[in-house]
Amino acid sequence: REKWREKLKADVDELDLTNKKTIWFHCASLGEFEQGRPLIERVREESADTKIVLTFFSASGYENKKNYPHADLILYLPLDTPKNARDFLDLVKPKVAVFVKYEFWYHFMKALNDKNIPLILASAIFRDEQLFFKNYGKWYLKSLQLVDQFYVQSEKSKDLLTSHGVENVEVSGD
């Protein structure tokens, strides 16, 4: 993650993302990547001119998939700070962002919302014991309002979200 801005700017300049449709996929690690892989490959298959930026938080994802042929750019996600989020989005300029499973990066979510870039949470799972649904977790629950569309793995996850006022939910399976 050192000097990520300089590296990303050089990569973006090389890809020439200007006026291109770019979709940003974020997966924490290799397991989440495997859940997001069918979406990435479907986008690549149906829209060859779309640029795909793929980020990981962990080395298990990045090191195993740094040469994945269906993404145009693969990198580590910078730490979740307001400035990092704004700078990342200013460089990548995604038209839409897809976070897979358990990814809740508040400053990135807020920056996407501020820039009117749709955020999709795919293959998500929600459980009663998660912080969002605790009495002291109201702020975290409110942060879910920054997500434009949830695709969850089960009816239970959907019911849990809707019981807390989150309506933009569809069951898509795993």
Image (cartoon, helix red, strand yellow):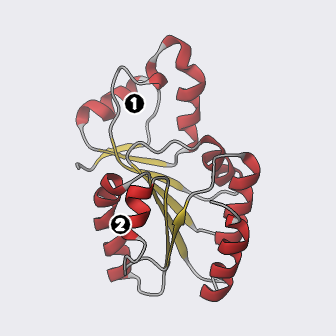
> To which residue does mark 1 refer?
161
Q: Position of residue 14 (x, y in %)?
A: 64, 88
**Under tag 2, what secondary structure?**
helix
Residue at the spot 68% in from the left edge and 51% down from the top edge: 111
- Above or below residue 20? Residue 151 is above
- Position of 173 with respect to 73 (left or right) is left
Q: Is residue 44 above or below residue 114?
A: below
Q: Hey, what amino acid is under mark 2?
A: Asn
Q: Earlier in the sequence, mark 2 or mark 1?
A: 2
Q: CA distance from mark 2 to mark 1?
A: 33 Å
Between residues 33 and 114, which one lies in front from this camera angle?
33
Side of 155 where 122 appears, left or right: right
Query: Is 138 rendered above or below residue 171?
Result: above
Q: Which mark is residue 23?
A: none
The answer to whether 32 appears left or right of 91 in the picture is left
**Residue positioned 24% across, 35% down in the render:** 155
Residue type, label 1: Leu
Front residue of 35 and 65: 65
Instruction: Compare residues 25 and 172 and report the one nearer the observer.
Output: 25
Residue 64's mark? 2
